[in-house]
Image (cartoon, helix red, strand yellow):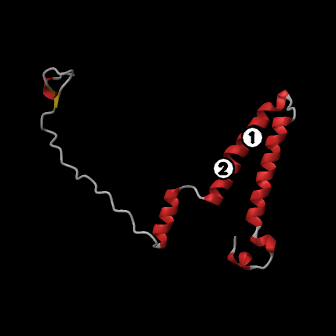
Amino acid sequence: MDQIELANDARFNRRFLALFAMFMVAASFAYIAAITFLAVPKENQRFADTVLGFLLGTLLGTLITFFYGSSKSNQSKDAVIAGQLPAPPAVPLLPLQPVDPAAPVAVKIDDSTPIKVEDVKP
């Protein structure tokens, strides 16, 4: 929301997100109760299941994530950005060793004698 709208004294503007979320949760619960306790015609069963899956998986999940945060790692990332926590140490990368393409390569199969690449015929 705009900071100007939030600074406004109108109560509806300041509480819009919470009111909208409460309405969506109430509407979702009403729909869940309706398809649970009321008879759904057989030809509309798949439609009712699709809407129920959307409400549970997308709408309610998004609202919970929005109001309560998505994960602890995001909170710690925000704290690092804000300068409240030190940045985690960098993980050192292993240095890559150059490979000589002319060097023979030995392969051991089933604990038998090693086979060199030169011995394998195409």
Q: Is residue 100 left or right of residue 71?
A: left
Q: Secondary structure at mark 1?
A: helix
The image shows residue 75, relative to residue 11, as above or below, that is above
Q: Residue at x 83, y 27 (%)?
A: 42
Q: Is residue 68 left or right of residue 9?
A: left
Q: Residue at x 74, y 38 (%)?
A: 50
Picture quarter with the N terminus: bottom right
The image shows residue 101, relative to residue 71, as above or below, that is above
Q: Earlier in the sequence, mark 1 or mark 2?
A: 1
Q: Could you tell me the amino acid type at mark 2?
A: Gly
The image shows residue 25, relative to residue 2, as above or below, that is above
Q: Is residue 40 left or right of residue 101?
A: right
Picture quarter with the C terminus: top left
| Camera-side residue of 119 and 10 | 10
Q: Residue at x 52, y 62 (%)?
A: 75
* Residue at image mark 2: 61
Place residue 51 in its image quadrant. top right
The x, y position of residue 56, in whole percent, is 70, 44
Q: Give neighbour class at mark 2: few <14, some 14-19, many 20+ (Cα, 10 Å).
A: few
Q: Residue at x 62, y 55 (%)?
A: 65
* Residue at image mark 1: 52
The x, y position of residue 109, in whole percent, is 20, 23
Q: Could you tell me the amino acid type at mark 1?
A: Leu
Q: Give neighbour class at mark 1: few <14, some 14-19, many 20+ (Cα, 10 Å).
A: some
The x, y position of residue 19, in whole percent, is 78, 62
